[in-house]
């Protein structure tokens, strides 16, 4: 693995480097990545690339903490340490049980499959408007015009954010997640400004929800209690940031990645169009294929052996979901986009106690977008090169020019 640097974001600027992870799974499935000039904090970290090892670690939240570990003040689920008490330990996804479990339980009913059934008709109407507008253009940026729109509208609706503000929120989230002009762990004036504006927006909105609760998720968080105590202001604020980012920056990449795969395989498009019962399995394959969240980090809380290697208490451990999703031990012919793949136990939504809380929402969004496209669009073809987000944390598409032909 000489010279391999997973903190050099240029490696990710043209899509996820699957070939690197094929070599890791084969030769060094639990590998200690030494620090390089690009690595935040000048500290190496473990890279876990096989499905079975990733499942084992993700299922043991006591040993593999999302919050932190011995000997370090910060932690969290990115390679770079985030400050404890500000992000780590405050954000729901960077918090350990038992508080994590109680916090999560507050939100589960609003995001459960049953709740999704009540918003499906609204999502479908929105998808129809989005798809019709893109078809009317003929040539468009599939990412901005189609893939990003429904997830963004849906998360605004869910949180109780006025729809007219949604694009500002997306710009702020994009600025903080894409690494167009900066290295890992670095911020620029632009990203700091975006983060500050998002923070100010979230604070003002939460203030309104405290005064005038509505039936949305943010109002729920503003009035929720754990053991009789309200969530701290910072917990509420960070939940807003998390849900905006998780809601708007992931599903869109699964939609764009799925469309990209289907453009390469027009036969599959026709099969699903003629038999919609194939769509749920096709959506799962799009999730496996696109793996919008390539990795999450944990911190070892004790010495532990994983895949034959001894990991020390306090070490950073990265779990590469995207690599697991190409593991030939679990997925026969893993590099084939197979819309009928069954079983398909992909890890696009993670595994264990932090399994994606928005999985049902993401699935229904994907379902209605593709169902609408299948109804109204005859075919799509690339109208220019696809441009990827420069990030090892989001397998994102920045632009995807396409030509759409109506039915
Ligand atoms: C295709 C779309 C999506 C993908 C690939 C995805 C991926 C993931 C992954 C891998 C995790 C686990 C993180 C970890 O273990 O450290 C996660 C957690 C989470 N996701 Fe998603 N996500 C998607 C959509 C959404 C949406 C639409 C929402 C909400 C609006 C959402 C909200 C969350 C939350 C709140 C967590 C933290 C759960 C916890 O810590 O208990 N996600 N997601």
Image: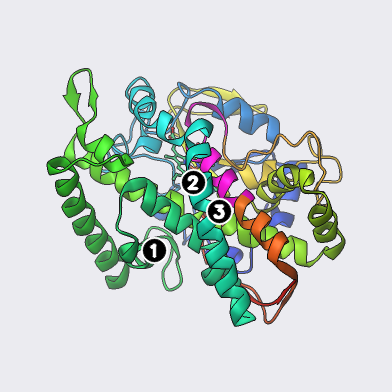
Instruction: Point out which mark residue 38 bears.
Output: none
Which residue sits at x=41%, y=34%? 110
Which residue sits at x=52%, y=70%? 144
* Left or right placement of residue 35 versus residue 4 in this view: left
Say what secondary structure mark 1 lies in.
Answer: helix
Mark 1, residue position: 170
Q: First in sequence: mark 3 or mark 2? A: 2
Say what secondary structure mark 3 lies in.
Answer: helix
Mark 2, residue position: 44
Q: Is mark 2 within 8 Å of ligand 1?
A: no
Neighbour class for label 1 at 10 Å: few (<14), some, many (≥20)?
some
Q: Is residue 357 magenta?
A: yes
Q: First in sequence: mark 1 or mark 2? A: 2
Front-lying residue, 203 or 132:
132
The image shows residue 55 at horizontal and vertical percentages of 63, 29
The answer for how far apart the CA atoms under marks 3 and 2 are is: 46 Å
The image shows residue 377 at horizontal and vertical percentages of 71, 68
Disc nearest the viewer among 3 and 1? 3
Q: Count the marks.
A: 3
* Left or right placement of residue 42 versus residue 192 in this view: right
Say what secondary structure mark 2 lies in.
Answer: loop
Residue 397 visible (yes or no): no
Q: First in sequence: mark 3 or mark 1? A: 3
The image shows residue 71 at horizontal and vertical percentages of 33, 32
Report the span colored magenta. Answer: 351-367
Mark 3, residue position: 124
Disc nearest the viewer among 3 and 2? 3
The answer for how far apart the CA atoms under marks 1 and 2 are is: 32 Å
């Amino acid at each position: 693995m000489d010279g391999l640097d997973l903190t050099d974001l240029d490696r990710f600027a043209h899509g996820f480097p699957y070939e690197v992870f094929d070599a890791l799974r084969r030769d060094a499935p639990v590998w200690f990545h030494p620090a390089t000039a690009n690595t935040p904090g000048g500290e190496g970290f473990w890279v876990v690339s096989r499905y079975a090892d990733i499942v084992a670690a993700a299922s043991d939240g006591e040993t593999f903490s999302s919050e932190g570990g011995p000997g370090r003040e910060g932690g969290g689920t990115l390679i770079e340490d985030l400050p404890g008490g500000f992000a780590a330990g405050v954000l729901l996804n960077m918090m350990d049980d038992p508080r994590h479990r109680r916090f999560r339980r507050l939100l589960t009913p609003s995001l459960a499959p049953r709740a999704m059934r009540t918003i499906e008709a609204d999502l479908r109407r929105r998808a129809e408007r989005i798809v019709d507008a893109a078809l009317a253009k003929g040539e468009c940026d599939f990412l901005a015009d189609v893939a990003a729109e429904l997830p963004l509208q849906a998360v605004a609706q869910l949180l109780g954010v006025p729809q007219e503000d949604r694009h500002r929120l997306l710009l702020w989230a994009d600025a903080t997640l894409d690494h167009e002009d900066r290295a890992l762990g670095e911020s620029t004036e632009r990203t700091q400004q975006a983060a500050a504006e998002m923070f100010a927006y979230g604070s003002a909105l939460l203030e309104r929800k405290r005064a005038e609760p509505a039936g949305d998720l943010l109002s729920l968080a503003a009035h929720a209690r754990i053991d009789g105590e309200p969530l701290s202001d910072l917990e509420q604020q960070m939940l807003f940031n998390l849900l905006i980012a998780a809601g708007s920056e992931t599903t869109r990449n699964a939609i764009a990645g799925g469309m990209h795969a289907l453009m390469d395989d027009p036969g599959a498009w026709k099969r699903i169009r003629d038999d919609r019962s194939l769509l749920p399995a096709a959506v799962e394959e799009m999730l496996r294929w696109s793996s919008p969240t390539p990795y999450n980090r944990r911190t070892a809380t004790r010495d532990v052996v994983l895949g034959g290697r001894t990991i020390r208490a306090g070490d950073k451990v990265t779990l590469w979901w995207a690599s697991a999703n190409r593991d030939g031990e679990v997925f026969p012919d893993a590099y084939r986009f197979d819309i009928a793949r069954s079983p398909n136990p992909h890890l696009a939504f993670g595994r264990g106690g932090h399994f994606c809380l928005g999985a049902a929402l993401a699935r229904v969004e994907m379902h209605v977008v593709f169902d609408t496209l299948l109804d109204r669009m005859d075919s799509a073809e690339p109208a220019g090169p696809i441009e990827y987000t420069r990030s090892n944390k989001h397998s994102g598409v920045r632009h995807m020019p396409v030509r759409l032909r109506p039915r």
